[in-house]
Image (spheres, rainbow, N blue to C red):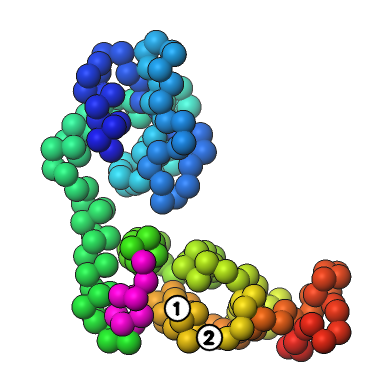
Amino acid sequence: MNGFWKVVSEDIENVRIRQADSFGPYSEFTERWLEEKTMPKQVSVNGFYRFDAIMQALFGDERVEPELQDWLFDVYMHALVPIEFRTGMSYQELQIRQKWNALADGTYGEKNAEIFCSLDSDRKYYIAHALWSQEQTGAGIRKFADVMVRTLEKGIVYKNKCREKQILLYVSNNENTEDAEVIALVQELFLPLGYELDIFWEKHFAVIGQEQTMQLDEIKLL
């Protein structure tokens, strides 16, 4: 944010801020966020990262033409960025930090707090952000799967088409306490009510049409 503010504040009349064409949901800037060769300078950011409610209203209204959206985004960001810089932390970031603290102090259970505190800072932030996001949008299998794969840092999540409420998790290594605890934490915080999770360690289950999963002695039966 400081580098972005430096560019905007030094020559604000010659900076145009635009919504990035592609971005991660938990990233504010793309790798090439500044185009200095253009005039005015082009700065690309993910406005949803800090100002989600405002941007949802702007880009979610189909009546607003894309050209007008781009112009309004530039106007909004020129107004919001100085305020954001002075306050130091957005309201969204404050809420995420509160989730982090609640997870760590046992509000979501002592065992969950123990597991959460054992994680590195990146995974702690990701879980706190996802928990905050879940409260805004509701629980869902896609969110559960995203958090599981990102937090576990290995594994694949499947939905069993034959059993609507069964979720399958494949983990490529042998069963171990550290991974099992991470799975338990994510399951308790993000798996929607009514669903069950079956875990497959090391050996994959057979998937029809996927040759690599159909080898004898290398699969488990459902």
Q: Is residue 43 above or below residue 130?
A: above
Q: Residue at x 36, y 39 (%)?
A: 47
Residue under label 1, please give it.
182
Local secondary structure at mark 2: loop
Q: Is residue 194 visible?
A: no
Q: Position of residue 155 (x, y in %)?
A: 60, 71
Quadrant location of the N terminus in the rendered image:
top left
Local secondary structure at mark 1: helix
Quadrant in the picture for residue 111: bottom left
Quadrant in the picture for residue 132: bottom left
Residue under label 2, please give it.
176
Q: Residues within 10 Å of mark 1 (few under 14, many from 20)?
A: some
Q: Is residue 24 visible?
A: yes
Quadrant location of the C terminus in the rendered image:
bottom right
First in residue order: circle 1 vs circle 2: 2
**Left of 124 or right of it: where is 209?**
right
Q: Position of residue 214 (x, y in %)?
A: 85, 77
Q: Position of residue 49 (x, y in %)?
A: 35, 46
Q: Residue at x 21, y 56 (%)?
A: 94
- Residue placed furthest toward the top: 39
Quadrant in the picture for residue 203: bottom right
Q: Residue at x 52, y 67 (%)?
A: 153
What is the magenta segment's predominant secondary structure? helix
Using the numbered discs, state the Cα–Cα distance from disc 1 to disc 2 in whole angstroms: 10 Å
Q: Is residue 208 above or below residue 137?
A: below
Magenta highlight range: 112-120
Q: Is residue 55 above or below residue 160?
A: above
Q: Residues within 10 Å of mark 2 (few under 14, many from 20)?
A: few
Q: Is residue 194 above or below residue 35?
A: below
Q: Residue at x 67, y 81 (%)?
A: 202
Camera-nearest label, 1 or 2: 2
> What amino acid type is highlighted by mark number 2?
Asn
